[in-house]
Image (cartoon, rainbow, N blue to C red):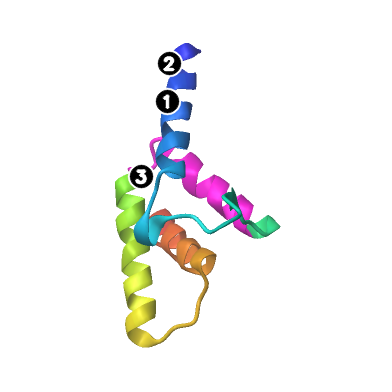
Amino acid sequence: MTQERNVTQNIERKVTDMSGFSALPRGNAELVFTPWEGREFGVAVTLPHAGRYQWRESNNVFIEHISWAEQTGNSSTFYQRRLAALGQLALQ
C-alpha cells in the first residue's frame, strides 16, 4: 500500500508542477473546474496510472491539439482540447 501511495503522490506532484501549455487553469492558486472538466481531468490522470498510456504521451497529444487549434483559429477551451486528446488516446 505504501508503494501505491508513493506513486499517487508522485503523480499528484507532477500534475501540480506542470507549466507551459500543459499547466492546469488556476484561480487564486486553486484548480478551476466545472463538473465535466473535473471528471475529464480525473480520467486523464487515472488512465496513465492504470497503464493505458504514458503521461508524456498524453501530454504530447494534448500539445498537438493545442497547436492545431492555434494554427486553425479554433476557439476551443483548455478542457475541450484535453478531451479531444483523451479521445484520440482512447482510440489508439
Q: Earlier in the sequence, mark 3 or mark 2?
A: 2
Disc on res. 55: 3
Q: Is residue 52 above or below residue 3?
A: below
Towards the viewer: 47 or 64 = 64
Residue 10 falls in image quadrant: top left
Give the CA separation, mark 1 to mark 3: 13 Å
Towards the viewer: 28 or 50 = 28
Judging by the rendered image, the residue that carries numbered circle 1 is 7
| Kind of residue indicated by mark 3 | Trp
Give the CA separation, mark 3 to mark 2: 19 Å
Disc on res. 31: none
Image position, residue 3 (x, y; %): 43, 15
CB within 8 Å, label 1 to label 3: no
Image position, residue 66 (x, y; %): 37, 70
- At a point 37% along the width and 53% down the height, the residue shown is 19
Q: Tell me the SS state at disc 2.
A: helix
| Kind of residue indicated by mark 2 | Gln
Q: Main secondary structure of the magenta part?
A: helix
Give the CA separation, mark 2 to mark 1: 6 Å
CB within 8 Å, label 2 to label 1: yes
Residue 64 falls in image quadrant: bottom left
The tally of labels here is 3
CB within 8 Å, label 3 to label 2: no
Disc on res. 3: 2
Q: Residues within 10 Å of mark 1 (few under 14, many from 20)?
A: few
Magenta stretch containing residue 5, yes or no?
Answer: no
- At a point 40% along the width and 39% down the height, the residue shown is 14
Q: Is residue 41 visible?
A: yes
Q: Residue furthest top?
A: 2
Per the rendered image, the range of residues in magenta is 37-54
